[in-house]
Amino acid sequence: MTAAPPEAAPAFIASHSFTPYMQAILAELQALPGSPRVLDLPAGRGQFTDALRAAGIDAVPADLNGLREDYLPLDMSSALPLEDASFDAVVCTEGLEHLLAPQELVAELVRITKPGGLVYLSIPNVHNFYSRLQFLFTGTLFQFQAYDIPDTTRNHLGDRGHVSPITLPQLRWWCWMAGAEVEELLPDKEKRRSLKPLYWLLHQLGRPWRGRLERSGPEELSERNQGLKSLINNKKTLYSRSLVLRLRHKL
């Protein structure tokens, strides 16, 4: 008996815009010396790759959508057929949440980045106050509306949509396991800025409960937990539409 063929792969969803987080990542990559080799996965419609190349950066775009002939046809849900330490930096914006096992791609991205090199990740921010309010009143997270997601088989090759909400501690742990450290959160557009007075009130109301949780860990984890506390309570975490992280592959 032969195995059933994989489902056909329709074009992946891709943004037309050049987002604030793309601008922030581009500015950092432009500051790297020489002409760094950078993987852009998923490349989407190619606007970020084009901006990298215009800045003199050796950009390598990859995507399954087949929109451009220069795209490497890499499947983010499988092991990447690329050599260890083959890129100075890797950029994966709005890709992890489309995967059933995003931690496996995180490990692959760190693997193909040179020691000391950079990995940039962006994911929908389920920590921001707007997402918290949406979950409180609807039972669904911001940018993860279950009613929009079709049922797909395990061997589906197309875009599943936003199927994997990822928390910041979860992503930090995956990066640490893969051999990378979170260095910085980068800025992105704020979600529903007009609700900031309400957000401030919610933040103050949660302070006692939050404090008890932050002090609950064992003493040997106190330094790590201080870092987690700073990440979770960062203004970019509380307000930004997306979480944008800069990682460094540890030497």
Image (tube, rainbow, N blue to C red):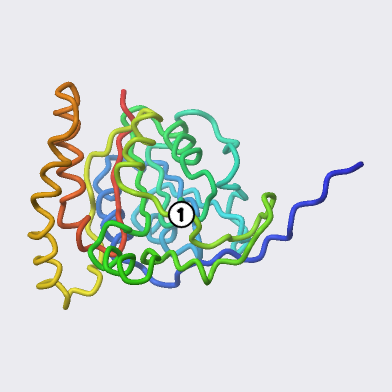
**Relative to 159, is 212 on the left or the right?**
left
Give above or below for 15 relative to 39: below
How many neighbours does mark 1 have within 10 angstroms: few (below 14), some (14-19), or many (20 or more)? Answer: many
Give above or below for 83 relative to 184: above
Picture residue at 22% right of the left edge, 68% below the top: 190
| Front residue (pair 136, 44) | 136
Give above or below for 179 relative to 102: above
**Relative to 161, is 92 on the left or the right?**
left
- Point out residue 19 in the picture as x, y percentages from the top left corner: 33, 66
Q: Secondary structure at mark 1?
A: helix
Picture residue at 37% right of the left edge, 55% below the top: 123
Quarter of the image for residue 12 reads bottom right
Residue bearing the label numbered 1: 97
Quarter in which the C terminus is drawn: top left
- Point out residue 102 in the picture as x, y percentages from the top left corner: 48, 45
- Point out residue 13 in the picture as x, y percentages from the top left corner: 53, 67
| Front residue (pair 124, 56) | 124
- Point out residue 99 in the picture as x, y percentages from the top left corner: 53, 50
Quarter in which the N terminus is drawn: top right
Picture residue at 38% right of the left edge, 29% below the top: 177
Q: Residue furthest right?
A: 1
